Image (cartoon, coloured by chain):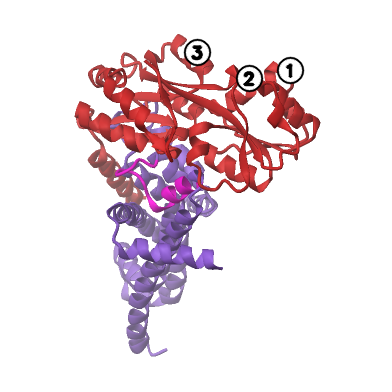
Chain colours: A purple, B red
Amino acid sequence: MTENSGIFIQSLYLIFSLDADLMEIIGLSLYVSLSALFLAALIGFPLGSLLAIRKFTGSKLITVIVNAFMGLPPVVAGLVVYMLLSRSGPLGLLGLLYTPEAMIIAQCLLIFPIITALSRQTVEDMNYEYDEFFRSLRLSFSQRIKTLLWESRIGLATVLLAGFGRAIAEVGAVMIVGGNIEHSTRTMTTSIQMEISKGNLELAMALGIILLILSLGVTTVMHMVRSRYSTMQGGYRNE
Amino acid sequence: MRLAIIGVVILGLFLLLFSRTDKDRPIIFMATTTTQDSGLLSILIPELEKDTGLDIQTIAFGTGKVLRSAMEGNADVILVHDPENEITFMENGFGTERIAVMRNNFIIVGPESDPAKIVTSDNAANAFTKIVRSQQNFVSRGDESGTHNAEQKIWSKLNVDPLTLPAENYIQTGAGMGRTLNVAIEKAAYVLTDSATWATYENKGDHQILFEGDDLLINTYHLITVNAESHPHVSPASQNLILDWFQSNKAYTTINQFKHQGQTLYFPIR
């Protein structure tokens, strides 16, 4: 028990001492995962709503594939991006392997299916509810997508959270395409893995606690935003 | 569908935005996990950067993965410890120069009580035989790393295929040295490791060094420069700066003075 409380104190000490290396690692973790989330949402939201509203040839197939890829193992996502970006791969000329950008691409690939599949579900429910209303207004297709995305923003915030959680927590993909380079591609999860392999189990645990606190912080912020909006919306929808 | 196309175009633009020219690209120095876990790289690389003025990024993987990455041109210079595979690598034209940098020893580590009584072994092969005979557990890296291949050499000297041993006795982790040591300690098993990793490893439990000192257990590290002719993004000029530095007195003293609790971890080779 004394040993465990020691770990907790060590992690608190690490946070409050504002250790420059630790801050850099935290910053990089957030930069990579949030960028991946942004890119994935940029493509995932429109694609998800398209799949929800329009039934076209192959839309069912795409939906099935996207759903299946929600379970894509991070190491496989990492391997695919590695083979693409490797010097002997098709995109080797870009020289992107072992850079933070490569990690963003890998995480984007990992969470894009989650964002697409979950936003499709959210928007589809919303579309079903408002279908007649939209018809009566004779909204154009793009207006309809815009309205639906806006109206489902609370559900979509949860979708973003799910994607962010998956991105910030994974280690397999960023290890393969990032390489855990100090001051360049070392994230929270890869440094935890490195400390475990050095046998520094206490430091690894302390880093783990920090990662948890970080993730808790992001979730809390999004939750607060969400509950604020939902009370506002509840007000005029009079539910 | 139009949205999807726009999405792909945006992703493409991001890729282009991210891409780097070869000029501002840092040197990728790939080394074995043991040199990172022992802390050598964090002493050596800053000195190397300071003296050569190069921007160097270090990546640590097992030797097998390092050699594979270097073949594909994903590294500029590599530091590895698997002589046989290194020679194959050179013979196939993947590297241009190969110099010996430093050495230390492989050691056999096990529980303090030493149930197989390997302390009194004459050589490494004899120690392995005792472990097999007394049906004790042995943990292997099983990841094609330098340490793993050194272990394979001992088995082949004995004419024993370790894969024919019972799976509960011969445990393959497929992981780096540190994580393999974690497993060995939990399973009260014997394990082959290198002296530097063991000295700096923090989670020893009641394990200790039970056998060392055999010619088969010499662990030599070589520096190899990746063939710049087949990989145009690799700069031979920067490679030569690094090669020269590793042959300098500065490198010799830096490696020689790298100690853990007063113990020299790597012995530089001239």
Measuring from the top left, give residue A57's x and y in whole percent.
47, 50
Q: Is residue A31 magenta?
A: no
Magenta stretch? A180-196
- Which residue is at the far top? B91
Mark 3 falls within which chain? B
A124 or B223: nearer the viewer: B223
- Give the vertical position of A222 relative to B165 (above or below): below
Left/right of residue A116 with respect to residue A91 in the rendered view: right
Residue corresponding to mark 3: B88
Q: Earlier in the sequence, mark 3 or mark 1?
A: 3
Q: Nearer the viewer, residue A14 or A159?
A: A14
Residue A23, picture quadrant: bottom left
Q: Which residue is mark 1?
A: B159
| Marked residue nearer the N-terminal end (2 or 3) | 3
Q: Position of residue B38 (x, y in %)?
A: 44, 37
Amino acid of disc 2 = Lys
Q: Residues within 10 Å of mark 2 (few under 14, many from 20)?
A: some
- The residue under label 2 is B153
Query: How far apart are the two marked residues, 2 and 3, measured between alpha carbons?
Result: 16 Å
Q: Amino acid at mark 1?
A: Asn
Mark 1 vs 2, N-terminal side: 2
Check disc 3 and give the amino acid type: Thr
